[in-house]
Image (spheres, rainbow, N blue to C red):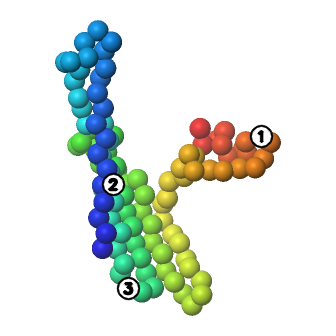
Amino acid sequence: MQVGGLLTVDRDNSLDDWGNAPVHLSRMELSVNVNVNEKSVGSITLLSDDDPNSIVIDQALGQLTIGESKLLFGRQRFNLGLQTTRLISDPPLVDLAE
């Protein structure tokens, strides 16, 4: 089992008062990856934005290996920052995702 997390802290900057700017917790993530056995793996990521009392499932995946094939199922986020393209213009999926 692997457990990881991310905490993001934001500071409300004011140009006239840098010394007393308040700091608040803006994002919390907790991820767990579990190797159930050699042929099945599970992963879940819990997310909370701006409100620690509201936690949602951001990503939940499972993978089964059957022979030489791998079956991936669940909910996975699509990170536009990692998308690469060699097209002259963006594909229509980019407009839909934004």
As measured in the structure, the alpha-carbon distance from the residue carrying label 2 to the one carrying label 1 is 34 Å
**Residue pictured at 40% horizontal, 72% vertical:** 42
**Closer to the eye: label 1 or 3:** 1
Residue drawn where x is 42% and y is 76% of the image = 41
Q: Which mark is residue 37?
A: 3
Q: Position of residue 78 (x, y in %)?
A: 54, 52
Q: Which residue is depicted at the point 73% across and 42% down?
A: 90
Secondary structure of residue under mark 1: loop
Pointer 1 local density, CA inside 10 Å: few below 14, some 14–19, many at least 20: few
Q: Is residue 39 left or right of residue 17?
A: right
Q: Quadrant of residue 31?
A: bottom left
Residue 89 placement: quadrant: top right
The residues bearing labels 3 and 2 have C-alpha atoms spaced at a distance of 23 Å
Nearest to N terminus: mark 3 or mark 2:
3
Q: Is residue 28 above or below residue 76?
A: above
Residue annotated with mark 2: 46
**Hey, what amino acid is under mark 2?**
Leu
- Marks 2, 1: nearer the viewer: 1
Circle on res. 89 = 1
